[in-house]
Amino acid sequence: GNVINFLMKFQEISFPEAVKKIAEIGQIELEKAGIDLQLLNEENVKKGEILHALDLSAKFYVKVLANETDAGSARQYLSGKKILPATAKKYKLGYSPTQNSLLKHLSENSISEETMEMSGMIYKKRFNKGSDRDRFMGRLMIPISDINNNAVAFGARVLTNRNSPENKAKFKQPKYLNSPESLVFKKSAILYGIDVAAEGIKRENMAVIVEGYFDVISLHQAGIDFSVGCLGLSLSNSHIKQASKHGKKIVLCFDGDAPGQHAMEKLCQDGMLEEFSSSEIEIKIADISVFGEGVKDPSDFVNEMGKDAAEVFRNEVIGKAKPWMTWYTERILNSYEYKTDHSQFEACVGKIVRFLKLLKSPAAKSFQAYKFAAALGGDSLSLR
């Protein structure tokens, strides 16, 4: 956890008392620092209540998945993804019933409606219309936990076949529905699976960052227990910082489809990865698309490779990952017919120049300019 939690547990003191003690040790005047202990305590109490509600919800969903007939479609989906029962148990996978069962369960456990709403588990009625109801119904539930193994949010996957003719027209909800942000959950600041992957990342000095929940779960089940997910395509610098606390090597392995590849390209061209160039963090990009159309993501990869998945992933995916600048350099050059088309040549050069302007290191800028010039058949100085 952190120093405050340690003091609270070790000395059996309250949150405000722990803050005061740390302030005394550090010779910090709380009033001058603008710290209001009463407000801090109130927020801490609310966080505790939200975490309790989320913990009860996670245990409820797990029980429903294991025991209820209504959860048959969820169990069938997990079987189709080749997720073993032991793995489902380890990751606390569950099922949300189609009725307002969770609302009733939390009420029976003395959770207030305010806390239910703040935790993101229910929709509150508005303007006295309708009634309170569960946010998630009829979905496979995936708890998102923090580094201390506290459930802080949920990812919820729809189980009906959205592509069938009878469902295509009526389906408006997304395939995945996530909890809203709250006092305990900020999407840009948490990596899915970090609670179970931290030890593996430390052991390997490496984190493999993928997109989705089942990419992480499938990789872990196969033996790549140092993988984490960024909950979609929105990788943030906070995600990289969080992973790098446990390992200094980062391998990005997004889906092999156009959105996944475009997302990695955007990370390179918007300067986010460049922020870490002067640090000890080494960032590489792996390409899962080279394994063919049947392998769209790491989860597909594991299912395709079977018992050899871990070995092949280490050798052929991680082992052949490229430094992000190298990957992006090749991406630019492979995106244009610059050798035969003048307009394509101009567009390629324009993109190269914009990329070089992002680079802060003179050495990196000169090296990349030299590589581009060698490919284009020109002078590297003219690109800088």
Image (cartoon, grey):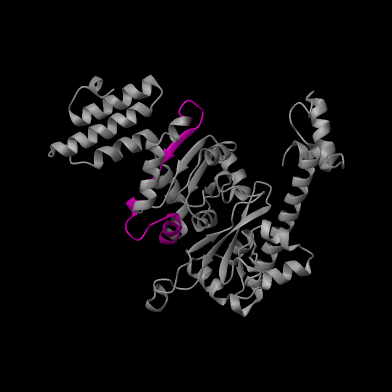
Indicate whether residue 279 is drawn in magenta.
yes
What are the residue bounds of the magenta stretch? 276-304
Q: In the depicted view, which residue is nearer to us: 261 or 50? A: 50
Asked whether residue 320 is in view, the answer is: no
Name the residue at 24% across, 22% down.
380
Q: Is residue 100 left or right of residue 293?
A: right
Quadrant in the picture for the C terminus: top left
Q: In the depicted view, which residue is nearer to us: 221 or 266? A: 266
Q: Is residue 256 above or below residue 243?
A: below
The x and y percentages for residue 147 are 65, 46
The x and y percentages for residue 202 are 59, 39
Name the residue at 69% across, 67% down.
60
The x and y percentages for residue 266 are 38, 41
Q: In the depicted view, which residue is nearer to us: 259 or 117? A: 117
Q: Quadrant of residue 1?
A: top right
Q: Is residue 317 above or below residue 281?
A: below
Furthest-right residue in this view: 12
The x and y percentages for residue 10 are 84, 40
Asked whether residue 67 is in view, the answer is: yes
Furthest-front residue in this view: 127
Q: Quadrant of residue 8?
A: top right
Q: Quadrant of residue 335?
A: top left
Q: Is residue 75 above or below residue 58?
A: below
